[in-house]
Image: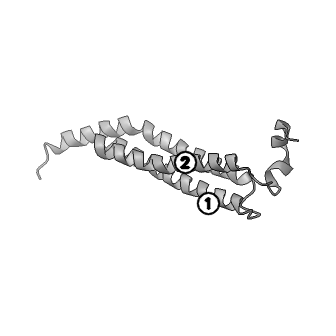
Amino acid sequence: MYSISNILTYSYWFTNVPEMGAPALWGQAVFYALLVIGNFAIEYWILMKKPDRFLARVLRKVKTLALTMGIIGFVFLFFRYEYIPLFSRRFMYIVWILMTGAWAGFLVLEFRKIPQRRKDAEEVDRIKRYLPH
């Protein structure tokens, strides 16, 4: 019988996983597909709205995150579907979440630097006006 307290045990994360039901597989597949589709949606938004170069740079990094984590998620899902012993274990999802969280943390730091970069670029442009070409 399933109990939430099993999540805190070593054997839950590192034993061979039982067969996944179709709803769980489809749910994960839809989530990873949304990440990949989100990649294209972000690129479309960048092309249509034409944000400034600093925001576009960070959004392209977010786009790369979504595509990479969507593909890695599909690879993990394939391993789980095929019952490949090491890569189908539950701890791989923790690895995936940690990778995504670390990458997203760096993106948040990049996003916070945008106002300062805009200010620095304006200062450089102001100074370049007075320099000979």
Helix, strand or loop status at disc 2? helix
- Residue at 34% over, 40% down: 117
Q: Earlier in the sequence, mark 1 or mark 2?
A: 1
Closest to the camera, between mark 1 and mark 2, is 1
User: At which x and y percent is residue 109?
Assistant: 48, 40
Q: Split into 4 quadrants, where in the image is the N terminus?
A: top right
Give the quarter of the image for residue 114: top left
Residue type pointed to by label 2: Trp
With respect to residue 111, does 76 lie above or below?
Answer: below
User: Furthest residue to the front?
Assistant: 22
Label 1: state its secondary structure: helix
Is residue 7 toward the left or the right of residue 64 in the image? right
The amino acid type, in three-letter code, at marker 1 is Val
Tag 1–tag 2 contact (CB < 8 Å): no
Name the residue that disc number 1 marks: 75
The image quadrant of residue 121 is top left
* Mark identifier at residue 11: none
**Residue 69 or 108: which is nearer the viewer?**
69
The type of colouring in the image is one colour
User: What residue is shown at x 68% (from left), y 61% (from top)?
Assistant: 79
Q: Does 39 sit above or below residue 88?
A: above
Report the residue marked by disc 2.
103
Q: Can the viewer see residue 52 in this picture?
A: no
In the rendered view, does 125 fall on the left or right side of 15? left
Q: Position of residue 15 (x, y in %)?
A: 83, 56
Q: What residue is shown at x 58% (from left), y 46% (from top)?
A: 31
User: Residue 53: where, in percent of width, then height?
Assistant: 31, 45
